Image (spheres, helix red, strand yellow):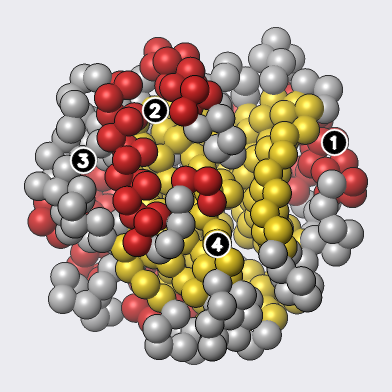
Amino acid sequence: MTIIKKTVEQDTIQVQISSFEVQGGVTEYQVLISVTDFSLPFQAQLENLRKAYMNVVKEDLDGDAISVFRRYFVSDAANQTDAIMEWECENSYCALSIVQQAPLNGTKLALWTYLQTGVRTEVHKSGLLEVSRNGYRHLWLGGAYNKAVNSEYQTRLLMNDYVMQLMEQRCTLAANCVRTWFFVQNVDVNYAGVVKARKEVFITQGLTENTHYIASTGIEGRHADPSVLVQMDSYAVDGLEPGQIQYLYAPSHLNPTYEYGVTFERGTSVTYGDRKQVFISGTASIDNRGEIVYPGDIVKQTERMMENISVLLKEADATTRDITQAITYLRDMADYAVVKEYFEAHYPDLPQLIVLAPVCRPGWLIETECIAEVPAESSFKPL
């Protein structure tokens, strides 16, 4: 087993690559691409990012690596999405998400892409991308949305449609969905509708405080169309056996989310025969009573947030050194410099993008989600 993290500089572009490789198994790549020259116009930034992506796939990754998910973080979705889609239409299909969450280094876009080797892909009519190997079917959905009247009804339709998409694949929300992301326009106003609709749909699917919920991030994020108040990405796995999924709680540091009215898991790990994948939900500076810790202090909130993440990872036998991808969200762009300095001093090897996106509770100044990976030996089939 090999874990490699490296940073590549390419003509106004920085590329962070994390790879997880097992002899004879799937190699996974998490790639984060940032523009470094904020003076360039958007079209030039996009072209440089595109060239860097193609070069990385050709020169730095295994030759048969396939992108199964891409998310663009942009500064102005209404004016930038069409140009991104022109290029995306030339690529082989993967689950795709474009979200207005401006990179906080002052540039106009960044990219997270997840690639795997040795897998087969199939696009279903519903829009789900199936990635299959060794008896597992990984189902990715990107950029789902509708234009119902408000955030509650948009979320309800999104969730109900997703339940039907899973049913078409002989899957269920409760048994197969591992991770969701909800991007909410004007989160301070519209998140309550998301919470209400999600909770009610969950109840119909047997997801309650007595069973389990799903790892998730609910965060500010805009679609190109201003009438879209909520968009959703998701990830599910078919072919798992009982015992492969573990839910992470960290009760010494965090409380169950239902205690303050929301319904998601703090983290979820999936164990395969050769590795364990760990999905940490959006995590902020919170204690085990559901209270905000260190109101108004961005550095202290960052410290507590990372402490919470560390404790969650420990439950899955992982540490922050095993993180292969992280997205950090800031409410106030003026906090960027001090947060960047903190991470460089304390987590210099963390593969990370920092973007502008208010968290679902105004008092939280910062939130981070991440994916970690560790080797595992079990009786389950390898990935």
Please name the residue shown 49% across and 84% down the image. Answer: 240
Q: Quadrant of residue 375?
A: bottom right
Distance from Cα at disc 4 to Cα at disc 1: 31 Å
- Asked whether the residues under the numbered discs 2 and 3 touch, taking CB atoms below 8 Å apart as contact, a structural biologist would say no
Q: Measure how far apart labels 2 and 3 are at the Cα level.
A: 15 Å
Q: Position of residue 255 (x, y in %)?
A: 16, 54
Separation of marks 1 and 3 at Cα, in angstroms? 41 Å
- Earlier sequence position, callout 4 versus callout 1: 1
Figure check: 261 above or below 201: above
Earlier along the polypeptide chain: callout 2 or callout 4?
2
Q: Which residue is mark 4?
A: 374
In the picture, the disc for residue 330 is 2
Q: Nearer the viewer, residue 312 or 28?
A: 312
| Quarter of the figure with the N terminus | bottom right
Q: Amino acid at mark 3?
A: Ile
Residue 361's tag is: none
User: Residue 269's x, y, as percent?
Assistant: 43, 67
Q: Which residue is mark 3?
A: 286
The residue mark sitting in front, 1 or 3, is 3
C-alpha gap between disc 2 and disc 1: 28 Å
Left or right: residue 52 compared with residue 109: right
Q: Secondary structure at mark 4?
A: strand
**Residue of label 1:** 51
Residue drawn 53% across the image and 82% down it: 378
Q: Is residue 157 visible?
A: no
